[in-house]
Image (cartoon, coloured by chain):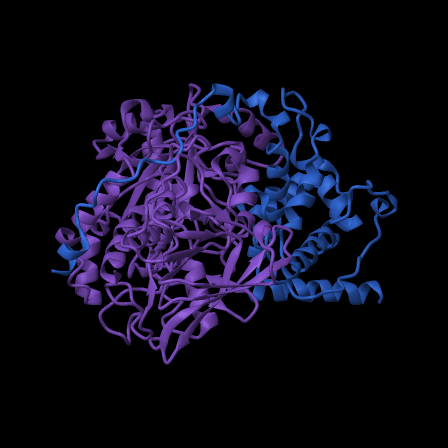
Amino acid sequence: MSQVKWQASGLQVHQASDVTSEHIALEADVVVVGSGAGGAVTAYELARMGKRVIVLEAGPYVPSQAFTEDFTESLHALYQDKGGQANSSGDLLVLQGACVGGSTVVNGCVCFRTPDFILQDWQRDFGLSELTEAELAPYFDEVEQNLSVHDNGEHEIARHGQVIRAGANKLGWSVKPLRRNIRQCGLTGHCLSGCKTERKQSMLVTYLPWAQAHGARIYSDTRVEKVVTEGGVASGVEAVVTRHDGTVAATMTVKAPRVVLAAGAVQTPVLLLKSGLANRSGLVGKNFACHPSLLVAGRYPEPIHPWRGAMLGVHVDEFMHPDKGGFILEDGGFGLVEMTMLAEPGTGKPFMEYMENARYLAGLVTLIHDHNVGAIEWDGERKAINYQLSDADFPSMKRAIKAAAKLHLASGATEVYVPASDKRVIRSEADIDLQVDSLENDPQHLRMVSYHPQGTCHMGADPDHSVVKANGETHDVPGLYVADASLLPTSIIVNPQITVYALATRIARHMS
Amino acid sequence: MNSQFQARQIKQIWQRGVARRQFLKWGLGGVAAATAIAAGGFALLRRSPHDELPTPDWVTGLSAAEYHLFDRARVVLLPVEGTPLVDSEAVPVVANVQTTLSYLDPATRKELGAGLSLFDNVVVFSHGCRFVDLEDAQARALFDRWGEGSVLQRTLTTVIKQLVYSAYWQEPATWPPTEFDGPVSEKWGLEYLGNAPMPQQPTIDVEQEQA
């Protein structure tokens, strides 16, 4: 067991600016690709067991003090593809963190356990008999405790959450405080730009420093290009260290008998496809789901200031079960730049009037239980996210919009803006069907965002119909593991970070 | 190349783009991405007085035509008369667009350039002049109509709008009239909490797990 050397703030990260040689050759017991939810947890668990762990992160190391709380700057500094990662049609933005700590740095802190009916689907349809609620509960308990997960207190429910809750109560819909991984929330509303004062319990201030305290080494600016095998068994990775100006600082090889891929549901399959590994089933990159989300805004008679207070306060779970609709609604704060993508209340004066009165808006985020119809592909030069909302899922999306509109109206909104490419404003219940039924499932019609890519290396018992086992190891390559949201066999409706933490903990314990 | 040939070519490009369902990408925060519309070397169908206008020295990542397109879109999309909002003339809108586009990979940037050229030129068929020469009201009506139009029309208008809107609203000078607070942690003097304490011994240990 290594000597524990925890530091009070920040991380010691090997960065491209530190590189002095053209090639770096390292050895470890485990090399972890990615430093987000799956990678950080795995690194900690294995390091504390005395394993020599190296974490490779393609993105930069941005310490909390450098966060600007400016959303546009944050997109460029902290997000994949500078915030521009989108599907091939360009109508679905796939937002993922690309920095040390990954998406956990830029998410909204929401923590849901995997719904039990989802686990039952996995057991029935994918042979994952051991992934029961009882089996996973201790892992959830542990990560929730480690990350200070708690129900939002009353002070953490901002004005926009309060009006939404009141509307839900009026309708008799189930509404609950969201659970979040945060300590002493500063109520800044800037979660998506990273938590500047280190209150969000992201990997940047939790599992990564803990892993480092147990001896794990972290390399940023380091993109893994290939997983290497010897005799069919994982033996390490090849990587490139790139300076922030885009020039190559060094090449890197890491020899390790255990390789853990935790680069997220887009990058992990890309890496496997580049490496030509673990794809006997032909399912690497397939089965992509992403909870395509809309932000439905309502305009209220009194100021709401949607950027003030905790970004996410309450959620409506009335329709969570697929039999009841298969979607949830979360009240969501936003700033001005985010607002520009919400609605089109006309060009020119109508739009500027809408923006001038931004303080009167409140938002609802819709999350739907989409089917896994997408695919991540690699053409030798560029990745492609091929995902189009399926016709089977479109009714869910419309039901979610209708419910959001009804809830806004019940909450006192005078106008609800449908996030479509054309002007669609709902002013009464009678408008809802009129404005929503005529929506078409065409590209570039709805303004969708995904925060939850999943499913591209999904777990299953059958090696011909899945990529990895329930313990995270790929069916095809001993020693090669996946520990991120790629694992999830189906979309889980709810924010997946806690599910990834729990599964990664379990995978690491089995590995050790 | 004569203008009749050019017109046929534009029409073909338009139809091909729609038929193949290949579209411009767009993004939150004004980060535009790809267009897969075919056709490089899309020549101008009609000259514009804007072609003779100089571009500022800082314009290094936009073609002259792109600069004039975005500057025209700025005027059309961001009117402030009669409001307390800040005049877009006082905000580096087009410079911010240029910065955003600089983050695109070269292939995507080239494709986007083709899309922008198409947007500027194709309205010659319906209006007899390029987008940059449309009257304000005509240009706004065009954006609204295209927002309800074909996939390609929706895509092009969405990309341009998103780029211009985010380029304007990202500027702190535009925030006070809306009461948007911007960054607050330093203003409020929030203390840094630092790294979280190390966890207690896990409740599930390896031996237990493997038993």
Residue A27 location, quadrant: bottom left
Q: Could you tell whether A500 is left or right of A385 in the image? A: left
The quadrant in which the C terminus of chain A is found is bottom left
Which residue appears farthest toward the right when viewing the image?
A: B52
> Viewer-proximal residue, A234 or A336?
A234
Q: Residue at x 31, y 22 (%)?
A: A155
Residue at 56% x, 25% y is: A356
Q: At x 39% / y 38%, what residue is drawn?
A: A7
The colour applied to the residues of chain B in this rendering is blue
Instruction: Identify the residue at the far bottom of this view.
Output: A231
Q: Residue B29 falls in which quadrant of the image?
A: top right
Q: Nearer the viewer, residue A243 or A54?
A: A54
Quadrant for residue B88, please give it.
top right
Q: Nearer the viewer, residue A76 or A65?
A: A65
Q: Is residue A404 left or right of residue A221?
A: left
Chain letter for the part of the structure drawn in purple: A
